[in-house]
Image: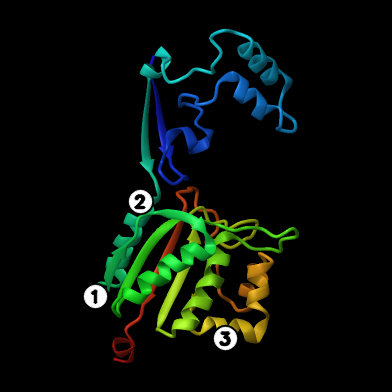
Amino acid sequence: GETTVLVLSDVLGDAIADIGSGPFAPAEEDNAGALAIAQRVRGMPGAVLTHLRAGRDRDDAGPVGAGASCWARVATAIIASCDTLLDAAEVAAARHLPEVARVRLAPSGGLVPDVAARLLAELDEAAPNTLIVAGGEPTVVLPAEPGLGGRNQALVLEMARGLAARGRPATFVALASDGGDGPTDAAGAWADERSWQRLQSIGDPEAALRDADAHPLLAAAHQLIHTGATGTNVLDLQLLLVRDVERMME
């Protein structure tokens, strides 16, 4: 019979082989390569290693490669991805901010400072009363002894510093779509152009960034966002609202 695989993509690019380790996708590694990886995994069942060793020693070694006939019986459909998340964010923005222009960026990754630089470059070009909608998954480089935080909380601190340097009225939000940012109870956090100074009055945001310890400082500033588990995972959402001061005063 045919197998139908419905996929929620939590990886950039939506490559089937990368989502959930690709259990229903052709393998790119041969058995020798798979065995080398499996042997490095602590607690790997012996039966798995035995199977891979047997395959390694055959002339036709390869754990069901792309040319195998079985894949003709597998149908795969990506039913949601980061683009789905951004679509939903735009629909919600149109409902709650009907007079705000929206600029949508393609989902992307990269180190937290690089993602912040990308968003701040968009801010520099954006007119007031614009919402920049972005998504993806930034990466945090952890120190030897990291504190408590998550990639979205680190990104919010980085953006708080950048917003303060520019001084433009803007509010930034970064959220994990599954409701859990790193090993914390928060989905993410928010910041505006005044946050960096406020955070400096509470603690040391530079040290929090350096030590991957954003959570305690953002918690003390009441800038964390808690959603609880959402039951899905389609990467992260980033929203940057360039506020119109005159409109706000009206």
Give the image's coloring scheme: rainbow
Q: CA distance from mark 3 to mark 2?
A: 34 Å
Image height check: is 66 above or below 141? above
Image location of residue 33, percent across then percent down: 60, 24
Query: Which residue matches tag 1?
Result: 99
For residue 3, what is the image quadrant? Answer: top left
Q: Is residue 148 left or right of residue 94?
A: right
* Position of the C terminus by quadrant: bottom left
Instruction: Identify the mark at residue 197; answer none if there is no mark.
Output: 3
Query: Within 10 angstroms of label 2, few (less than 14), some, or many (20 or more) residues?
Result: some
Amino acid type of the residue that numbered disc 1 sits on in the rendered structure: Glu
137 or 174: nearer the eye?
137
For residue 42, what is the image quadrant? Answer: top right
Among the two numbered marks 1 and 2 on one chain, the one whose residue lies closer to the N terminus: 2
Determine the residue positioned at 40% across, 13% down: 69
Image height check: is 68 above or below 220? above
Amino acid type of the residue that numbered disc 3 sits on in the rendered structure: Gln
Among the two numbered marks 3 and 2 on one chain, the one whose residue lies closer to the N terminus: 2
Query: Which residue matches tag 2?
Result: 83
Return the residue found at the far top.
Answer: 59
Nearer the observer: mark 1 or 3; the answer is 3
Determine the residue positioned at 40% across, 19% down: 71
Image height check: is 61 above or below 248? above
- Observer able to see residue 137: no
Amino acid type of the residue that numbered disc 2 sits on in the rendered structure: Asp
Q: CA distance from mark 1 to mark 3?
A: 30 Å
Query: Within 10 angstroms of label 1, few (less than 14), some, or many (20 or more) residues?
Result: few
Image location of residue 217, percent across then percent down: 65, 74
Query: Within 10 angstroms of label 3, few (less than 14), some, or many (20 or more) residues?
Result: few
Q: Is residue 188 left or right of residue 79?
A: right
Image location of residue 116, percent across then percent down: 47, 67
